[in-house]
Image (cartoon, coloured by chain):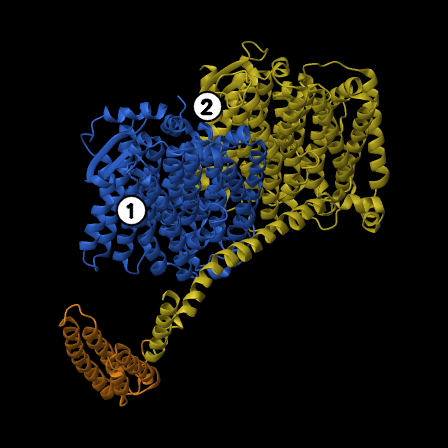
Chain colours: A orange, B blue, C yellow
Amino acid sequence: MSAAQSLSSYLLISAALFSIGVFGLLSRRNLVAILISLELILNSASLNFVAFNKFSLVDKALGQVFAIFIIALAAAEVCIGLSLILLLHRKKDSINVDEARELRG
Amino acid sequence: MGGRHRHSDRFLLPMTPPFPILSAILLCPVVGLLLVLLTPRKYETLIKLTALASALGTLVLSVVLLFIFKPSVPGFQLIEHMEWIKSYGIHYSNAVDGLNVSMILLTAIVIFCGILVSWSVTYRVKDFFANMLFLVSGVFGVFMTTNLFFFFLFYEIAVIPMYLLIVIWGSTNKEYAAMKLTLYLLLGSALMFAGFLYMYSLPDARTFDLIALKQNVRFTPEVQNILFLGLFIGFGVLAACFPFHVWSPDGHVAAPTAASMLHAGVLMKLGAFGILRVGVYLLPEGARHWADWVAVLALCNIVYGAMVATQQKDLKYIVGYSSVSHMGIVLLGIATMTTVGFNGAIFQMFAHGIMTALFFACVGFIYDGCHTRMLDELGGLSKQAPVISAFFIIAGLCGLGLPGMGSFVAELLVTIAAIGTYPAIGIISIVALLITAFYVLTAIQKAFYGPANPHHADFKDLDWFQFIPRAFLVACLIFFGIFPDIFINWVSLSTKTLLGIG
Amino acid sequence: MTDLHLFWVIQLAPLLAFLLIQVLPKTINKVAPAIGMAFSLTAALASLNLSFAHSQGAGLPVEFSRQWLVVADYAVWPNIPVPHYTLSVGFLLDPLNLLMITLVTTISFFVQLFSFYYMNEDPSRPRYFGFLSFFSFSMTGLVLSNNLLQTFLFWELVGLTSYLLIGFWFEKKSAATAARKAFVINRLADLGFYLGIILLFLLFGTLGFATLKADALRNVLGHGTLTLIGLLIFCGVMGKSAQFPFHVWLPDAMEGPTPVSALIHSATMVAAGVFLLARAFDLFSASHTTLLVILSIGAITALMSATLAAIQRDIKRILAYSTVSQLGLMVMAIGAGSAESGMFHLSTHAYFKSLLFLTSGAFIHRFHTNDIWEIADRGGKKDAVALGCLAFGLLSLSGVPPFAGFFSKDLILEVLKHHGGIFFYGVAVLVSFLTAYYSFRLFFVIALSKIGHEVRAHHESLTLKISRALPLFSLAALSLITGFTGHAFHLNMELLITTVILVVAGGALAYSQFKDPAAAEAALRGNQGFIFKILERKFFMDDAYDFLVKKVGLALGRWLNAFDRAVINSLMVNQTSFSVMRLGRVVSRLQNGLLQDYLAWAVGIGILIVFCFL
């Protein structure tokens, strides 16, 4: 098996995606960027599912099903997230996450 | 076991007497409460009359109960039993014995007078009387139930309206006092409920029924010691036992007149009653084990409460601390673990309940008229309002243990028992009589004697209607002071049973 | 009527008067004095009837008793003669309280009669007569009681009425303070009484006077216990009969209306202590130590207050200290073992001292001052009725034969000479000398002064004149004749001579100093001597009480109050709730509303968990 074919390289890519996603999640103030970072995390998860599906020999379809679930879920999530962001923009005229902190203790 | 034998007679009696008088007493304020809630807000007089009618109903029924009650029958009588949640041993069951028959009478007297005294309430009349009746239903429930679950439930029912009464109709730092009182009482009830649950969890128990617990469960000495300590602290908070007493003066001061009357007259007695009904009844060994400490705390209550009362400037604070001092006498009576002490303690609960109700009924009237309770701002009230002053002076004399009043006999019995059991503590506790005389007379001198204060020149004395409840309380005090054997006759057999004598 | 009926009449008539006066509406309360007098006359007649029926001691003692309260049906205290403890109530009549009840009811009738004159213009008359009747009720209850607890019950009630009547003019700050002082000091003394009763009840099992016999007591109780109980009960006596160191309330009690001083603070209530000593004499005589203490306390009191009486200017205070001193003499007599002589002096003293107080009331009411020099200045000696009665009373007080005081005091001196030892006899002789001195001083100041600003008598109606003069004359007559009714009446020549010498010496000394009262007053004002200072400060007794109350008692109260507020309320209670709130505030800071902070926490904690567990 070539290096390109090994599981660890997929996992490395997924980990990098996840880390970039987490970094974006924590560092960006723009809500759309945060949403995109969230998508990166989700995608890293689905990449993992597909990779494990390929290299482990349990049931060929299971990992792919999960990946498709995640895509659907991400789509729904983006829907809700974007509409919330839109509402926030209407209300505050900004989509900076730091502006939206009414729920503090 | 003697206990097992004694209580089997419960099964010889019919499970429900022909007329369920205890439930009737309990339902009277509940029905009154519903009627008050159904009456539209604007018919204030109708609301007051409804409340008065239900209070009068309970009073009449309680007096009837005294005649039905047979002091010569040991154990519980007039048992009313209705299964509710059988698998957890939670039943609606009421019964009387010598311990609670007088407490039911006391509650009925105090609520009757309390409603008459609150005739002058003008702010949110409907809510006020609804709360009063709700509160008193809870109190009746606690006194008559024989199921620990319902004991707890009724107790909580009594606490919540008290909070509302203080917060809405109170005075002087009322939010603070109401919150303090409620938190304290809930702390007490939490400890008490923890104790109940622990009893429930013991092997052979699996019931909240007091009588069944007494019959079925053998509490080992270690369990008794721990449980009694927990229950004593829980109930002690209610009885304003030192050092858990500070809620009571603050609460008395903030509460409106009728709520103070119920609070000091009845609510504080729940604690002492609980110690006897649950603590001593189920855990006699535990009670004996801690009796010395209880006696020391009681002495602290008696002397400390009286000493602190000498320093107060507010009439209600004086009465509040005097209550702390007098509740110490109740606790001392319990600590002696003798029938004489128990009789004295129950008598003192009764006499003190009526006496403080009278005290607060007088202070409340003065506050309504003069808009102050500070001793330095009053003065010479005897000149323009001789009747209310006379009532206050009578209450004060009862407080300092004047012979001929109920509390003298109570204190005498407790002191006899205390000197018999703890000579040193008994002798020191007598000193409180002197201190009490000092602060009561000082308060009388400052508020009622001396030159009249021109600020209160338009202060009007009692009219005949306001005269009735106060005169009724005085009559009760003097009646039981002159004929104490009637009272002692009600309780003496039950206290003997409680101690396992006779 | 049987005796029991008569007892009920004597006991309840004054109570009925009290209740009637309270119940009557304000509009017709003018009849209050009439009600009071009518009912007290009824009681007086009933007790006279009793005393004639039993005049030779026939059919005595009579006792009626019923159970009042079952305290316990087991022995609270081990090794006790009775198996159960029961308190009872009842009446007991024997020669002792037959004498006392006659005295109480008759004097209270005379005082009510005189009060009609004295309180004529007072708007609170109904209250006054109500309290006076209530006092008579309590006092008769005390006298007729057959056991110690019932005695204690009425003992406190007479204390209460005394409190109410001293503070009758409660608008005056001094009156209100004096009333409280009287009650609290009596309360202090009564703590001992109360404790003594409880101990006796616990250890002996019964409180009936009929069962308190010296032999029975000695059989059950040890000498130490008996002494303890006796002294504790004597504590109560010291309070009520104003014995050292509890005597301080009596002079202040003169703030009350003068007829009240005559009835309560000279003739009856303060004598209740001495009466109790005689009533429960076996309890005290069972231990000779107790008797010795009683004798010494009586001696200290008698001497101390006789000296104090000699420097007072206020006529009521002179009489008050004189009362304390005479009570001291009675206590000495009983301490020396002779209850009869104590009671004899009590009864003669009751009549002549109430006479003296009523006389002083007559002066005060007419001249509106208590100061003897001012009374004299405003024409005291022109009031022939009052002056004559004053002379009568003072002669009896100083023990001039054949007045009543002579016989009873003679008897006490004789008892002390034979049973008390030379020291106590000497004290009594000194007291008699001082008594004669201050009596004559009082008389000379009023009778020998020049009249300066004469106050003319108002025109008084005939009823008022009668109600003024009749009690004075009756009591004057009684204080002359009661001396001959003494049980152990015989003349001892040696003592007669001693007494006469004492009286003459005292009178002569008083005359030499006060033959010119104006000059004497000037001298008195100028006197700054050390002994005079001590006397003026009343041997610092008031200062000592002040110190105890303010510097010890109230300071402790202040300290405990601060403890209650600072430690229990603030530190324990409020700090607990505050720290809960503070904790909540700290924790709530975590929820700052910044989405990315929450995420950072979540990620950080997630990483921590991963590293910890994997």
Q: Are marks 2 and 1 on the same chain?
A: no
Give the amino acid at mark 1: Leu
Q: In the figure, B477 relative to C454: above or below?
A: above
Q: Nearer the viewer, residue C253 or C460?
A: C253
Spatial CA span between label 2 and label 1: 36 Å
Crowd around label 2: few <14 · some 14–19 · many ≥20 (10 Å): many
Label count reads 2
Q: List x then y, in percent, for residue B398.
A: 47, 39
Q: List x then y, in percent, for residue C245.
A: 70, 37
Q: Mark 2 falls within which chain?
A: C
Q: Quadrant of the N terminus of chain B?
A: top left
Give the amino acid at mark 2: Ala
Q: List x then y, in percent, for residue C158.
A: 55, 33
Q: Residue at x 23, y 85 (%)?
A: A85
Q: Quadrant of residue C517?
A: top right
What's the mark number on residue C508?
none
* Residue assigned mark 1: B153
Q: Mark 1 falls within which chain?
A: B
In front: label 2 or label 1: 1
Q: Quadrant of residue B128?
A: bottom left
Residue C280 appears in the figure:
yes
Crowd around label 1: few <14 · some 14–19 · many ≥20 (10 Å): some
Q: Nearer the viewer, residue C395 or B46?
A: B46
- Left or right: residue C128 versus residue B251 is right
Circles 2 and 1 in contact, beta carbons < 8 Å: no
Q: Nearer the viewer, residue C539 or B141?
A: B141
Q: Under tag 1, what secondary structure? A: helix
* Residue assigned mark 2: C72
Q: Nearer the viewer, residue C424 or B289?
A: B289
